[in-house]
Amino acid sequence: MVRPRRFLPALVRRTGPVTAGLAVGLPLSLGLVGAPAQATASPVGVPSSPAAAAPAPDTAPLRVRIASLSKATLPARGNITIRGTVTNRSDETWTTINLYTFVGDGLDPMSSSAELADAMDVPFEAQVGERVLEGDRGLVETLEPGETAPYVVTVPTSAFDFTGVAERNDGDTAGVYWFGVHALGQSASTPRDDFTDGRARTFLPFVPRRTDPVPATLVVPLVRGVLYDADGSLADEDGWERVLRPGGRLRDLVDLADPADEAGVPLTWLVDPALLDAIGRLAAGNAPRSLEPTRARDADPAAEAVPSDATTTDPVPGATSSGDDESEQPAPSGDEDAAEVTPAVRAARSWLAAAEDAFTGAEVLTLPYGNLDVGAALSASPALLDLARSQQSAVLEALGIDGRPTLASPDGYVDPAEVGAAKPGDALLVSDRYLQAPAPAVVRLDGHELVVTSDGATQGSPGPGRSLTAVGLRQRLLAEAAVRARPVREAGSPLSPAGQPLTVVLPTEWDLGTADEFFDGIEPSWISFTGLSSATSSASTGVISAADLVEPEATKRRLQPETFAAVRSLIDTGDTLQRVLVDNSTVGARVTEEALSAISYSLRGRQKVARTALSLARGWLDARLSGIEIIASSGVTLSGDSGTFVVTLRNTLDERVAVSIAAVTDQGLVVDPVEALELGPQSRTSVLLNATTTTSRVHNVTLMVTDVDGAPIGAGDQLPIRSVLVSDVIWVIIGVGVGTLFLAIALRLRRRILRSRRA
């Protein structure tokens, strides 16, 4: 149950004045999060239920940002230094801008995840803490309209008098306090006063020294929509270059490994295998599909990191390179000039090298290939889910990584059908926002274990301003861990409940450019960071039913059945082309990888684009299959009830193919099928077909070229076939006529002989 909280009145324009109590550094008792459930009256300007109303836009003339905190938790002694920026958002010049820290009520800290969630909805103008005058305040002399200036504020921890909390709770209870910066200045229209002209707010956890470590896991998702051009090359090279180069979104994510390692924080990676394979293709030069004979490969497993029809002998360039200097990345092998290596290729190679370093020794969770929309697949095509789960990543294999299969959605929701699709040993992640009541770190549903992730820890700090800054996200994560902290167990005393593990799937969109700051502050001894499996192995497990899962209020946008149908069609066409080609053994697998990438969670909002890409790829394959032609004569006449006729097969491709011929006929005519025929590149051959008929009428026959399994490949021709059949009556008449003729001849000869004798 959320403990009721209170507000002090919020002023209409700016937060309240500095009080006398601040002169000695003792913050006054202030409300922190929400109003009581049965409040008799609401303070002026504050809704009676802050959690129920979204905060109004921040209209303060000065925008304050916190860039760094020297201490992420409230220390026992020493100073806290806050660095950041202040921006003038008004149309007039501001002068003599003083910046102070403020802190929330030392007697009433937040102590649950629910209270932290409520704090996110507290209006920006609400007074949630008193300014502290001790220490070195920041000062900005002049700030022109639109100008931004840095500030530094230092405050001693002696200014935070929380002795009342320690006395009340015997020093055993952790809590979380409001903390931040107030800016006070003056302009032509705003005289100097004690009201706040700009603010930045975050959380400051307090954890007693005698606390059991809280197990925690940071999961870093590596996902992105992957689309291919019609020829199988990765689409939008420029876009990939932007996200893979240093400072790009995907590069910043793998670069989290370095500061995390320095801070002693192991990361767990949640990866889409299709994303890694796409980057591997790009690193190999982003060659289009090739129907050429498959080149021989060395025994080196890295040789399988990209499709075998690529032109390079180094399938994962840079994957084993040390260092990220793009100028040191190897050029493609073969006859390619190094100058032809594009920035996207260099960025991909450098990214793979960084990813290899990041994955080494870390726990890796693998999503179904393509980050498949599991719920939609179960409804539209369960076979594609099975295919995606069985599909292997060549890059992961090349890096020697055996990931743990995992089912997880971007919004953290799983329905019972998705749970039922899990296999033994799979990891399943579900956000606590979809559980009806506070749940342990691991729950069991229908015999499957689900790891409960913290939704609140991904929301960052309360505004105003961006919540998902490095400091904002870190402080919220530590706050969520702090409310899980439990006092250390003492010998001879009843065991206190151990702190429940905290599992956080980091958001994909946050200020990664300052990731060093995120990890620099994560140094508390009361958190034990481990991989996912280790953190949850000893966690208490609760049992839930399907009714305990809360469905999202809005209907989830799932992939449409038409998208799955287009994927199945492309895969089938790729398999057909694979069976036709004699010397190539990779094109079918490559097409399958491309197709599965189109039914990703990441493409839910771009389904028309995905289906267009699938259609164009299908057209590319059909064009190659149509390069095998069958040519028949304009018509065939059989001289009897059976006979033969000749057709011509022509291969216009530059590769050897193996095909068969099948005929579709009407009733009364049978054309014998032809066994597999092999045609060389750019060749033609004549094929003798045998036909049998039981009628003398004209039959329309469709001849089709098929693969060796009998699946039509698209090429075909039509011709009419008729038979010249003679009935038994005609043969009798002919026989009688012939007999009469011979009888007449015999009679005539006899008469001549008798006449001759008489003469």
Image (cartoon, grey):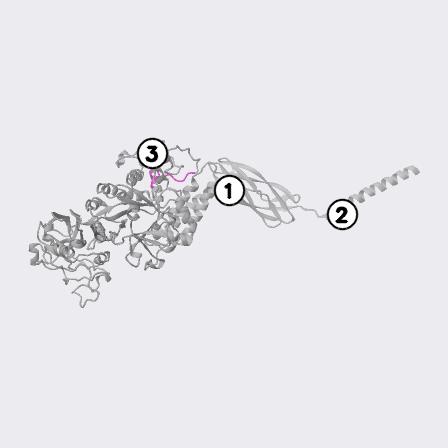
Compared across the picture, whether 751 is left or right of 69 comes to right
Q: Inspect this view and state whether residue 743 appears.
A: yes
Q: Write down the residue under mark 3.
A: 332
Q: Residue at x 34, y 34 (%)?
A: 332
Name the element at disc 2. helix
Amino acid type shown at disc 3: Pro
Mark 1 or mark 2: whose residue is earlier in sequence: 1
Q: Write down the residue under mark 2.
A: 733
The answer to which of 92 and 511 lies nearer the viewer is: 511
Amino acid type shown at disc 2: Ile
Q: Is residue 454 above or below residue 267?
A: below
Using a 10 Å C-alpha cutoff, classify the residue at mark 1 as few (fewer than 14 neighbours), some (14 to 19) or many (20 or more).
many
How far apart marks 3 and 1 lie (CA) works out to 36 Å
How far apart marks 2 and 3 lie (CA) works out to 84 Å
Which percent across, then down, holds residue 279?
A: 33, 41
The answer to which of 262 and 684 lies nearer the viewer is: 262
